[in-house]
Image (cartoon, helix red, strand yellow):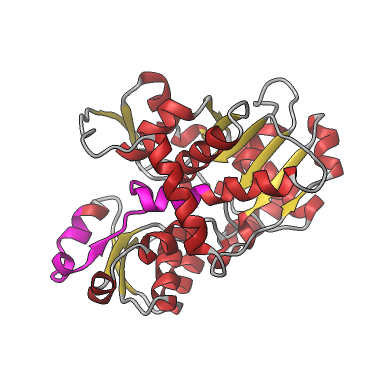
Amino acid sequence: MTHTTIESDDTKDLLSAAQVMKKIRTAQERLAGHARVTPVLTSTTLEQRVGHAVFLKCENFQRVGAFKFRGAFNAMSALPREQRERGVLTYSSGNHAQAIALSGRLLDTPVTIVMPHNAPEAKLAATRGYGARVVLYDPDSEERETVAASLPDAARMTLIPPFDHYEVIAGQGTAAVELLDQIDAPAQRTIRRLLVPVGGGGLLAGCATAVKALAPDVEVIGVEPERADDAARSFRSGRLERIEHADTIADGTRTPSLGVRNFALIRELVDDIITVSEDDIRAAVYFLFQRMKIVVEPSGALGVAAMLAGATGSPSASGVIISGGNVDNTLFANIISSS
């Protein structure tokens, strides 16, 4: 695992938070009837453990088993028909791949996806099952962006990256809008903070934009593994930090760095980014299965991991984005049997 700093002054195309919020509202309209309004679950045991109310926004019940469907479908829906007909290209370790593949099937759009050869088998199989063309690469010796750009037909396709894209960010932000609606409307309940997993930063940037527009007093806190802490490093240094080949079971957070667009929103709107250990992540996956009977992938369990580990500071009613449930069968069995 190596650490590097990225110097970037690519700010000419950055949008304001208000502009991104408008895109989130448009994304809500595009996703209506296509994305699921996922449930918000609570657990008396969890609340007793952490000492405050907790509302889990369960995107593991979203289409393709992860929040990524929101951003992928929104971004593809925003394309003119002629662009969709020429095809969409992306790169992903799994959840974005599945989301683009399913969106392509729903929108009758051919898709090509560059995936690491060691991606979880369940995610590879699901992506192919939705009808996508999958191109494998070796993450130890190749850069996925380079592999994608070198494909013979790359020039005619539209690239929709996993997180550094405003329509993707906007789609992901709809999860936070839903959560605020779901917990406020029934019983005038409120949260004081929102915990969001951090990989490439699209979910965190989108959720932070929505929360600060709709409930500006709510803290937004990103959570990532200690072994893949590029976002936390970047947040503190003010520069994009990069980590190659992060060794964490949370495969959805192995993205080497945040994107430029995501980072600008995160620096402006996010209150803090904290980290959790591999043992914390395993304990959270086990707790969610054993006590709440839900299957959550390690990346999706980061917020709960932080709370159970006492990493979130003073007790305060919290919302938590459970980002996905696409866990490798062998890894999940190992976590459950060894906990």
Q: Position of residue 217 (x, y in %)?
A: 62, 26
In the rendered structure, which segment of residues is drawn in magenta?
146-173
| Residue drawn at point x = 58 percent, y = 29 percent | 216
Q: Residue at x 29, y 73 (%)?
A: 81
Q: How many marks?
A: 0
Q: Quadrant of residue 200?
A: top left
Residue 105 lies, with reference to residue 238, above or below; the image says below
Q: To which quarter of the image does residue 159 belong?
A: bottom left
Q: Position of residue 339 (x, y in %)?
A: 73, 47
Left or right of 85? Residue 224 is right
Q: Which residue does the image show at 51% across and 63% down from the upper left?
A: 31
Residue 188 falls in image quadrant = top right
Residue 200 seen in the figure:
no
Q: Is residue 158 magenta?
A: yes
Asked if residue 191 is positioned above or below residue 282 in the image, the reply reads: above
Tell me what residue is drawn at x 59 percent, y 53 percent.
Answer: 297
**Quarter holding the N terminus?**
top left
Q: Is residue 70 magenta?
A: no
Foreground residue, 155 or 126?
155
**Is residue 8 in view?**
yes
List x then y, in percent, for residue 326: 56, 61
Is residue 311 toward the left or the right of residue 98 in the image?
right
Q: Is residue 143 left or right of residue 168?
A: left
Residue 191: % across, % down = 71, 34
